[in-house]
Image (cartoon, rainbow, N blue to C red):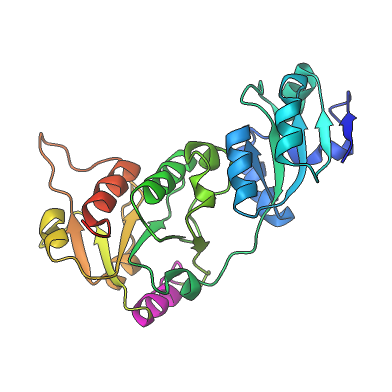
Protein backbone atom coordinates (compact mmCIF):
# COMPACT_ATOMS: atom_id res chain seq x y z
CA UNK A 1 0.00 0.00 0.00
CA UNK A 2 1.23 3.54 -0.70
CA UNK A 3 2.42 5.88 2.03
CA UNK A 4 0.10 8.90 2.09
CA UNK A 5 1.30 12.16 3.62
CA UNK A 6 -1.54 14.06 5.34
CA UNK A 7 -1.10 17.57 6.71
CA UNK A 8 -4.67 18.30 7.81
CA UNK A 9 -5.72 16.71 11.14
CA UNK A 10 -9.38 17.06 10.10
CA UNK A 11 -8.87 14.78 7.08
CA UNK A 12 -11.64 12.12 7.25
CA UNK A 13 -9.13 9.36 6.55
CA UNK A 14 -7.72 9.99 10.03
CA UNK A 15 -11.07 9.63 11.82
CA UNK A 16 -10.07 6.41 13.62
CA UNK A 17 -7.31 8.28 15.48
CA UNK A 18 -9.23 11.38 16.51
CA UNK A 19 -9.51 12.27 20.23
CA UNK A 20 -7.78 9.17 21.60
CA UNK A 21 -7.62 10.71 25.09
CA UNK A 22 -11.42 11.03 25.35
CA UNK A 23 -12.03 7.78 27.24
CA UNK A 24 -15.81 8.02 27.32
CA UNK A 25 -15.98 8.70 23.59
CA UNK A 26 -13.58 5.93 22.64
CA UNK A 27 -15.32 3.45 24.93
CA UNK A 28 -18.54 4.05 22.98
CA UNK A 29 -17.22 4.34 19.46
CA UNK A 30 -14.47 1.72 19.19
CA UNK A 31 -16.60 -1.41 19.81
CA UNK A 32 -19.50 0.08 17.84
CA UNK A 33 -17.26 0.75 14.85
CA UNK A 34 -15.42 -2.57 15.12
CA UNK A 35 -11.96 -1.17 15.79
CA UNK A 36 -9.33 -0.71 18.46
CA UNK A 37 -6.04 1.18 18.56
CA UNK A 38 -2.68 -0.56 18.92
CA UNK A 39 0.24 1.64 19.98
CA UNK A 40 3.96 0.99 19.39
CA UNK A 41 5.74 -1.39 17.04
CA UNK A 42 5.88 -4.18 19.64
CA UNK A 43 2.13 -4.09 20.32
CA UNK A 44 1.19 -3.81 16.65
CA UNK A 45 3.53 -6.70 15.85
CA UNK A 46 1.89 -8.90 18.50
CA UNK A 47 -1.57 -8.02 17.22
CA UNK A 48 -0.61 -8.87 13.64
CA UNK A 49 1.05 -12.11 14.78
CA UNK A 50 -2.21 -13.05 16.52
CA UNK A 51 -4.03 -12.69 13.20
CA UNK A 52 -5.56 -9.26 13.76
CA UNK A 53 -5.89 -7.10 10.67
CA UNK A 54 -4.76 -3.44 10.53
CA UNK A 55 -7.25 -1.04 8.94
CA UNK A 56 -4.58 1.66 8.66
CA UNK A 57 -1.41 2.91 10.33
CA UNK A 58 -0.63 6.43 11.55
CA UNK A 59 3.06 7.20 11.72
CA UNK A 60 5.59 10.00 11.91
CA UNK A 61 8.65 10.09 9.69
CA UNK A 62 11.09 8.60 12.24
CA UNK A 63 9.02 5.39 12.57
CA UNK A 64 8.02 4.95 8.95
CA UNK A 65 10.32 1.98 8.25
CA UNK A 66 8.89 0.05 11.21
CA UNK A 67 5.32 0.72 10.06
CA UNK A 68 5.98 -0.48 6.52
CA UNK A 69 7.38 -3.75 7.84
CA UNK A 70 4.53 -4.31 10.32
CA UNK A 71 1.57 -3.67 8.07
CA UNK A 72 2.52 -4.02 4.41
CA UNK A 73 -1.11 -4.41 3.28
CA UNK A 74 -2.66 -1.45 5.13
CA UNK A 75 -2.62 2.22 4.12
CA UNK A 76 0.04 4.18 5.99
CA UNK A 77 -0.76 7.79 6.86
CA UNK A 78 2.40 9.84 7.38
CA UNK A 79 1.92 12.95 9.54
CA UNK A 80 4.08 15.57 11.21
CA UNK A 81 4.48 15.57 14.98
CA UNK A 82 2.17 18.56 15.50
CA UNK A 83 -0.53 17.01 13.32
CA UNK A 84 -0.36 13.76 15.29
CA UNK A 85 -0.70 15.65 18.58
CA UNK A 86 -3.62 17.80 17.43
CA UNK A 87 -5.36 14.75 16.00
CA UNK A 88 -4.94 12.32 18.91
CA UNK A 89 -4.91 14.75 21.83
CA UNK A 90 -1.44 13.86 23.12
CA UNK A 91 2.21 13.87 22.09
CA UNK A 92 2.69 10.58 20.24
CA UNK A 93 6.10 9.27 21.25
CA UNK A 94 5.77 5.48 21.37
CA UNK A 95 6.00 4.90 17.64
CA UNK A 96 3.31 4.03 15.15
CA UNK A 97 -0.38 3.80 15.91
CA UNK A 98 -2.53 1.26 14.10
CA UNK A 99 -6.29 1.14 13.77
CA UNK A 100 -7.02 -2.57 14.02
CA UNK A 101 -10.10 -4.49 12.99
CA UNK A 102 -11.71 -5.76 16.21
CA UNK A 103 -12.17 -9.56 15.96
CA UNK A 104 -15.47 -11.23 16.81
CA UNK A 105 -15.51 -12.64 20.33
CA UNK A 106 -16.04 -16.40 20.71
CA UNK A 107 -18.71 -17.97 22.96
CA UNK A 108 -17.85 -18.52 26.62
CA UNK A 109 -18.15 -22.30 26.22
CA UNK A 110 -15.47 -22.32 23.51
CA UNK A 111 -13.07 -20.31 25.68
CA UNK A 112 -13.32 -22.45 28.84
CA UNK A 113 -13.50 -25.88 27.21
CA UNK A 114 -10.39 -27.81 28.31
CA UNK A 115 -8.96 -24.84 30.23
CA UNK A 116 -6.99 -25.67 33.39
CA UNK A 117 -6.75 -22.12 34.71
CA UNK A 118 -9.17 -19.29 33.89
CA UNK A 119 -9.18 -15.70 35.14
CA UNK A 120 -12.54 -13.94 35.43
CA UNK A 121 -12.60 -10.14 35.87
CA UNK A 122 -15.86 -8.74 37.20
CA UNK A 123 -16.71 -5.07 36.64
CA UNK A 124 -13.10 -3.82 36.80
CA UNK A 125 -13.42 -0.39 35.22
CA UNK A 126 -9.80 0.73 35.36
CA UNK A 127 -8.11 -0.02 32.04
CA UNK A 128 -4.66 -0.15 33.65
CA UNK A 129 -5.75 -2.89 36.05
CA UNK A 130 -7.33 -4.86 33.22
CA UNK A 131 -4.15 -4.67 31.16
CA UNK A 132 -1.97 -5.66 34.12
CA UNK A 133 -4.27 -8.61 34.90
CA UNK A 134 -3.98 -9.84 31.32
CA UNK A 135 -0.21 -9.57 31.51
CA UNK A 136 -0.25 -11.68 34.68
CA UNK A 137 -2.57 -14.19 33.01
CA UNK A 138 -0.23 -14.54 30.04
CA UNK A 139 2.92 -14.74 32.12
CA UNK A 140 1.62 -17.18 34.73
CA UNK A 141 -0.03 -19.75 32.54
CA UNK A 142 -3.74 -18.91 32.46
CA UNK A 143 -5.50 -20.56 29.53
CA UNK A 144 -8.28 -18.00 29.20
CA UNK A 145 -9.76 -14.78 30.55
CA UNK A 146 -13.43 -13.88 30.87
CA UNK A 147 -14.65 -10.33 31.48
CA UNK A 148 -18.12 -9.29 32.58
CA UNK A 149 -20.36 -6.97 30.54
CA UNK A 150 -19.42 -3.90 32.63
CA UNK A 151 -15.69 -4.63 32.76
CA UNK A 152 -13.35 -2.21 30.99
CA UNK A 153 -12.41 -3.02 27.42
CA UNK A 154 -9.27 -5.20 27.19
CA UNK A 155 -8.67 -3.77 23.71
CA UNK A 156 -8.77 -0.14 24.82
CA UNK A 157 -5.44 1.53 24.02
CA UNK A 158 -4.28 1.82 27.64
CA UNK A 159 -5.23 -1.77 28.47
CA UNK A 160 -3.35 -3.06 25.46
CA UNK A 161 -0.29 -0.95 26.26
CA UNK A 162 -0.14 -1.99 29.94
CA UNK A 163 -0.58 -5.63 28.95
CA UNK A 164 2.45 -5.24 26.64
CA UNK A 165 0.31 -6.77 23.90
CA UNK A 166 -0.26 -9.99 25.84
CA UNK A 167 -4.00 -9.38 25.53
CA UNK A 168 -3.55 -10.82 22.04
CA UNK A 169 -2.04 -14.11 23.18
CA UNK A 170 -4.52 -15.16 25.90
CA UNK A 171 -7.90 -16.35 24.59
CA UNK A 172 -10.66 -14.19 26.06
CA UNK A 173 -14.25 -13.21 25.67
CA UNK A 174 -16.93 -11.09 27.33
CA UNK A 175 -19.83 -12.63 29.24
CA UNK A 176 -23.19 -11.87 27.61
CA UNK A 177 -25.69 -9.49 29.18
CA UNK A 178 -28.24 -11.76 30.90
CA UNK A 179 -29.71 -9.92 33.86
CA UNK A 180 -27.19 -11.44 36.28
CA UNK A 181 -24.10 -9.61 35.08
CA UNK A 182 -23.27 -12.48 32.74
CA UNK A 183 -23.21 -15.09 35.49
CA UNK A 184 -26.19 -17.15 34.34
CA UNK A 185 -24.48 -18.19 31.12
CA UNK A 186 -21.04 -18.30 32.78
CA UNK A 187 -22.21 -20.77 35.43
CA UNK A 188 -23.63 -23.08 32.80
CA UNK A 189 -20.52 -23.00 30.60
CA UNK A 190 -18.09 -23.43 33.52
CA UNK A 191 -20.01 -26.32 35.06
CA UNK A 192 -20.37 -28.06 31.73
CA UNK A 193 -16.59 -27.76 31.25
CA UNK A 194 -15.93 -29.12 34.75
CA UNK A 195 -14.31 -25.90 35.99
CA UNK A 196 -14.23 -25.24 39.75
CA UNK A 197 -14.99 -21.56 40.46
CA UNK A 198 -12.89 -19.91 43.19
CA UNK A 199 -13.90 -16.36 44.10
CA UNK A 200 -11.28 -14.17 45.80
CA UNK A 201 -13.08 -12.27 48.55
CA UNK A 202 -12.93 -11.28 52.19
CA UNK A 203 -15.55 -13.51 53.80
CA UNK A 204 -16.05 -15.50 56.96
CA UNK A 205 -14.94 -19.06 56.36
CA UNK A 206 -12.91 -18.22 53.26
CA UNK A 207 -10.17 -20.74 52.48
CA UNK A 208 -6.60 -19.35 52.55
CA UNK A 209 -5.02 -19.39 49.09
CA UNK A 210 -2.15 -21.67 50.10
CA UNK A 211 -4.56 -24.27 51.53
CA UNK A 212 -6.71 -24.12 48.39
CA UNK A 213 -3.63 -24.45 46.18
CA UNK A 214 -2.46 -27.53 48.11
CA UNK A 215 -5.63 -29.35 47.05
CA UNK A 216 -6.04 -27.58 43.73
CA UNK A 217 -8.87 -28.88 41.53
CA UNK A 218 -7.76 -29.92 38.06
CA UNK A 219 -9.62 -27.02 36.43
CA UNK A 220 -9.99 -23.69 38.24
CA UNK A 221 -11.52 -20.32 37.43
CA UNK A 222 -10.37 -17.42 39.64
CA UNK A 223 -12.87 -14.58 40.03
CA UNK A 224 -11.70 -11.09 41.00
CA UNK A 225 -13.81 -7.97 41.44
CA UNK A 226 -13.31 -4.26 41.73
CA UNK A 227 -11.36 -2.93 44.69
CA UNK A 228 -14.19 -0.68 45.79
CA UNK A 229 -17.31 -2.84 45.62
CA UNK A 230 -15.71 -6.29 45.54
CA UNK A 231 -17.56 -9.20 43.98
CA UNK A 232 -21.29 -9.09 43.31
CA UNK A 233 -23.82 -11.39 44.96
CA UNK A 234 -24.19 -13.25 41.64
CA UNK A 235 -20.43 -13.85 41.46
CA UNK A 236 -20.25 -15.12 45.03
CA UNK A 237 -23.32 -17.31 44.51
CA UNK A 238 -21.66 -18.83 41.43
CA UNK A 239 -18.49 -19.77 43.34
CA UNK A 240 -17.71 -23.27 44.52
CA UNK A 241 -15.15 -21.93 47.00
CA UNK A 242 -14.41 -18.51 48.51
CA UNK A 243 -10.64 -18.00 48.69
CA UNK A 244 -8.64 -15.28 50.40
CA UNK A 245 -5.01 -14.18 50.27
CA UNK A 246 -3.78 -13.95 53.90
CA UNK A 247 -2.50 -10.44 54.58
CA UNK A 248 -0.26 -8.88 57.23
CA UNK A 249 0.47 -5.41 58.56
CA UNK A 250 -3.16 -4.40 58.90
CA UNK A 251 -3.65 -4.42 55.11
CA UNK A 252 -7.02 -5.78 53.95
CA UNK A 253 -6.19 -6.63 50.36
CA UNK A 254 -3.93 -6.14 47.35
CA UNK A 255 -4.52 -4.16 44.20
CA UNK A 256 -6.69 -6.35 41.96
CA UNK A 257 -3.96 -6.90 39.36
CA UNK A 258 -1.46 -7.80 42.09
CA UNK A 259 -3.97 -10.18 43.66
CA UNK A 260 -4.50 -11.80 40.26
CA UNK A 261 -0.76 -12.33 39.86
CA UNK A 262 -0.36 -13.85 43.33
CA UNK A 263 -3.32 -16.21 42.91
CA UNK A 264 -2.37 -17.23 39.37
CA UNK A 265 1.18 -18.01 40.50
CA UNK A 266 -0.08 -20.14 43.39
CA UNK A 267 -2.46 -22.05 41.12
CA UNK A 268 -0.35 -22.21 37.97
CA UNK A 269 -0.56 -25.58 36.22
CA UNK A 270 2.19 -27.92 37.38
CA UNK A 271 2.93 -25.99 40.58
Q: Is residue 1 above or below residue 95?
A: below
Q: Nearer the viewer, residue 97 or 127?
A: 97
- Is 30 on the left-hand or right-hand side of 265? right
Task: Please state the total of marks drawn on the protein image.
Answer: 0
Residue at left 54%, top 72%? 107
Image-based side of 32 in relation to 186, left or right: right
Q: Is residue 187 magenta?
A: yes
Q: Position of residue 70 (x, y in %)?
A: 70, 39
Q: Quadrant of the N terminus?
A: top right
Q: Can see residue 140?
A: yes
Determine the residue positioned at 69% across, 34% down. 97
Q: What are the residue bounds of the magenta stretch?
A: 180-192
Q: Residue at x 80, y 46 (%)?
A: 73
Q: Position of residue 52 (x, y in %)?
A: 66, 53
| Main SS category, magenta section | helix
* Magenta stretch encompasses residue 204: no
Q: Which residue: 30% across, 46% down?
A: 261
Q: Position of residue 146 (x, y in %)?
A: 44, 61
**Image x and y of residue 7, in percent:** 88, 23
Amino acid sequence: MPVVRIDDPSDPRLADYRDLTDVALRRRTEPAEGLYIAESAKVIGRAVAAGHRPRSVLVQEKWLADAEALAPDAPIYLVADDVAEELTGYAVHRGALASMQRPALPPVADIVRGARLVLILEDIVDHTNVGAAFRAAAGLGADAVLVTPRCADPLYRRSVRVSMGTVFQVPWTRLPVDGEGGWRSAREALREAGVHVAALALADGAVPLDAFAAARPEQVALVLGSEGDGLSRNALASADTIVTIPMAGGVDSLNVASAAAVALWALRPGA
